[in-house]
Amino acid sequence: MTHERRVPYDLTVPAPNGLRRGRTTGSCATAAVKAALACLLDGVRASEVDISLPDPDYYLTVPIQAVDLLDELTARAEVLKDGGDDPDNTHGATIFAEVRCNGSGQLRFIAAEGVGTVTLPGLRIPPGEPAINPVPRQMMQWAVAEVLAGRADPGFDLAIGCVEGGRIAKRTFNPMLGIVGGISILGTSGIVEPMSLAAWMASIEVYIRVALGDLPAAIAFTPGKIGRGYAADVLGLPKKQVVQIANFVGSSLEQAEAILQEQGRVLDTLWVLGHPGKLAKLLDPTVWDTHSGKSGMAMGDVAQLAQELGLSAALVQAIRQANTVENIVQILQGHPQAQAFWMEIEQRVSTRMHSRLPSARRVAVRLFSMDGTPLGAAAGDTHE
């Protein structure tokens, strides 16, 4: 296959945030497959190869670090992972492919040293398979077809690995996701968009899928680390059923709803655990993204609720003038209505979030101060 209808993707053009784009592990593995196969079939030791990207308008030119025959049936190629300006654990790693004729007429994917194997349900790759995601697999299939260029296909084993991948994987979420032995080969576009919303949401979707993979009765969302102790010690949730969603509340709820609809089931409970500085922003009916660039601070809405609930004018004014929501926690500390007040916020936020997750029987919000002290309903919970 040629690239007559495609144009080269220019990685030197910065992303909209001014940062440098890079190559995914999927693109690196695909380039290694293409270089190794060209060496095996045609004796070509390329210094770079062109690979087809999922976007049909583009191809990407990838430098090859090394390529050579291992024996008459096998060739190996290596590519240096360049993640651009994205703080990626695999940046600078060597991704390699060992391509071997198998005589079966089939393309088989194998986890070589440093690439993990899936052991838990809920991911897009079933247990027992190498942790090579669907889009990189498709890209490698295209690469094989391009090198064959209409020749008979004897079948090949594509063993994909990463030098020091086992060590690198310990710095990722792979152990928690049940991916053992190394890194995952990832990417949906072939291009790393540095610190992009798409990259964040793609990773959060994976964690939600893993959390729901065993069809549990309950999972938890946390904007950050606050509430994790409650999830483990009081709710008894394993780590994989607690998903850190950062600021992406609305999108995470929509992803959970889509996954539950795929599964054709209803989740008994979604717990949402965190600090009111983030979660109380959802008192504003326009807010679903709690990033400071997408939403204001919550003090005004909290003060408005305090006024609605009949707290004293002096207390409402103190809340309104607070510099942070944690300051409001301190202002209300010891007040006889404090727990009921935070419970009312929990209930209102729960109701709003439930509107985005109808496939859950209930959404239960629990609020905590910065030091992890329960503020609302959790103050009386030992288990629910």
Image: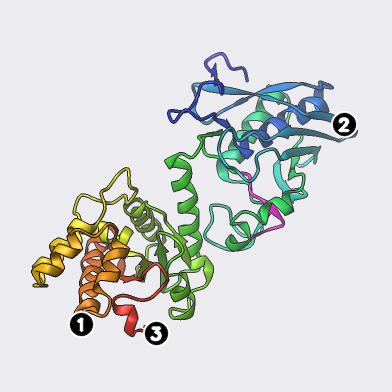
Cα–Cα gap, marks 2 and 1: 77 Å
The residue depicted at 24 percent of the width and 51 percent of the height is: 287
Classed neighbour count for the residue bearing mark 3: other residues with Cα under 10 Å, few (<14), some (14–19), many (≥20): few
Residue range (magenta): 179-185
In terms of image quadrants, where is residue 284? bottom left
Q: Earlier in the sequence, mark 3 or mark 2?
A: 2
Residue hosting label 2: 69
- Mark 3 residue type: His
Q: Quadrant of the C terminus?
A: bottom left
116, 99: nearer the viewer: 116
Nearer mark to the viewer, of 3 and 2 = 3
Q: Residue 383 — which label?
A: 3
Cα–Cα gap, marks 3 and 1: 24 Å
In terms of image quadrants, where is residue 282? bottom left
Nearer mark to the viewer, of 2 and 1 = 1
- Mark 2 residue type: Leu
Q: Position of residue 70 (x, y in %)?
A: 89, 35
Q: Earlier in the sequence, mark 2 or mark 1?
A: 2
Taking the magenta stretch, the answer to whether it contains residue 183 is: yes
Q: Position of residue 10 (x, y in %)?
A: 55, 20
284, 93: nearer the viewer: 284
Q: Residue 336 — which label?
A: 1
Looking at the picture, does residue 284 appear above or below residue 294? below
Looking at the picture, does residue 345 appear above or below residue 233? above
Q: Quadrant of the N terminus?
A: top right
